[in-house]
Amino acid sequence: MDFEPVKLHEMPKGSGRATFIRRLLTNPATAAPAELYDTRVFSPKFAAGKLVYVADAAHLETIFVERPDDFPKGRIDQRVLRPIFNDGLLLAEGGDWRWKRRLTAPVFSPAAMKRFLPDIVAPFAATANAFLAAGDRPIDASGAMKSATLQVIDRLLFGGEREIDPDAIMTHVEDYLAPTSWMVAYALFGVPQAMPFPGQKRQSRAKIGARDMLDHFVKKRRAGPREADDLTNRLLAASDPETGRGLSDTDMVDMLLTLQSAGHETSANALTWALYLLTRMPAVQERLAAEVDAVTAGEPVTHDHMPRLLAVRAFIEETMRLYPPAPSLSRMARKAENLSGVAVEAGAAVLVPVHLIHRHPDYWERPDVFDLDRFLRPGRPPRTVYMPFGAGPKICVGAQLALSEMTAGLATLLQAVRFEPATGGDPRPLHRVTLRPAGDLMVMAEPRGGRARPDNSVTTPRAA
């Protein structure tokens, strides 16, 4: 029987400004208008030409691939993210973005990532032990995945030597992002920067706290011997192959804060949704576990195993289709445009509802159904129809690292654990920059293959 997992719902056709604002403040991705299923480009009457939703693959090719400089990051990103992430790869534009992308590309190449796979696997092996140690008690899957992916980031970015507290940084980032919905609404409607909103003072303290911590860390690392082979030292040593320019201390803070926040949050949420799906589809879970056993023969997942974990990777990709890490992207039109007869003013906010595109019946067969084989069949969906990491030249530089982390991490969990639902209810998808379950997602875990207790041969990562 086909399984249709819980989904975000669109704003009903004909909705007005009040409904739009209410949805923006409570769950922003649900403000995407249902009219997009009919027209694929839509501008609501209350913001005609000033706010335009685009779900048309051809126009998205123009926006993301052919003319990205004409559609830079919009005022939502500038207002919400720039104060804390500054000019990291997420927000840099033009020449500033190009030299930083050239510098970072070799650092995140597939060859470079081979070195880091053991640091990805170890935290998930420890997490599997924690699941099994819980016995008959339900475990919060979202909390477990956040902890595991944060341990991965600590090892990859900071060498895992506790020179810096990644948990404290993420607490600052979460405090900063808590009032995001207010900032999105203010940005779309041109509310002045001086207008206060709930949580503003706490947000300001969080921004300063996160950046100060990383600034101190970068200065210490730059002055030290840099013996660890981690991403921080690789970035400190890297230079633009065209100009020889390296990253300043401020550039490094921007880069590390972006990499930690984006890399940790997106992977943790995608894996949380993956565990939800596994608990609802036991036959699929057993199919994946059988593949993992056949490929690894019970040994820790290695780089050589990765190309043969085809079903596990396809499962992750289908999970991100149904639950894209970034369910909505925003751009700004630098000049007046005409998109499918819809007049777009210069300076207009162009919103791209990724979650709606990923379930649009014009692009997908049985779009609301989970289909494990969807990404195992020959051919790939067009790059502006499936874009969990964006599209075009500004696609996430860490996309392959994230896919490797999620594939290896899930395979490691499935070697030891069988997941079952703790409750009969479905989680509610909530958009807070990324797409997460609202509240805890509880699961039950039992040993796979008759193993009755955790494998104590796996070293648990250092406590935060």
Image: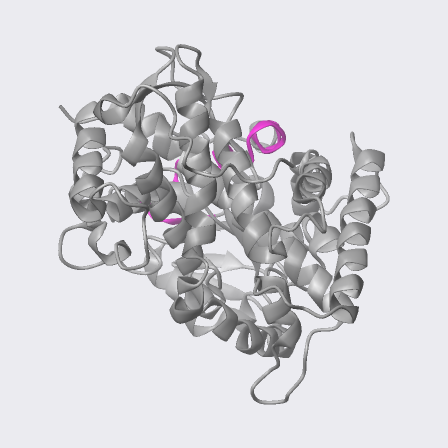
Which residue is at 72% across, 35% downward?
A: 175
Q: Is residue 228 magenta?
A: no
Q: Quadrant of the C terminus?
A: top right
**Residue nearest the viewer, comparing 449 with 257:** 449
Q: How is the image coloured?
A: one colour
Q: Quadrant of the N terminus?
A: top left
Question: Is 207 on the left or on the right of 262, as rendered?
Answer: right
Q: Is residue 30 magenta?
A: yes
Which residue is at 17% across, 27% downward?
A: 283
- Give the vertical position of 247 relative to 281 (above or below): below
Instruction: Please give the range of residues in magenta.
Output: 21-42
**Residue nearest the viewer, comparing 205 with 15:** 205
Which residue is at 40% across, 31% downward?
A: 128
**For the stretch drawn in magenta, what is the main secondary structure?**
helix
Which residue is at 56% across, 86% downward?
A: 241
Indicate the position of residue 86 as horizontal and vertical percent values.
72, 59
Question: Is 183 on the left or on the right of 134, as rendered?
Answer: right
Question: Is 324 on the left or on the right of 258, as rendered?
Answer: left
**From this viewpoint, is residue 51 visible?**
no
Indicate the position of residue 193 as horizontal and vertical percent values.
81, 47
- Give the vertical position of 410 relative to 256 (above or below): above
Indicate the position of residue 334 as horizontal and vertical percent values.
60, 67
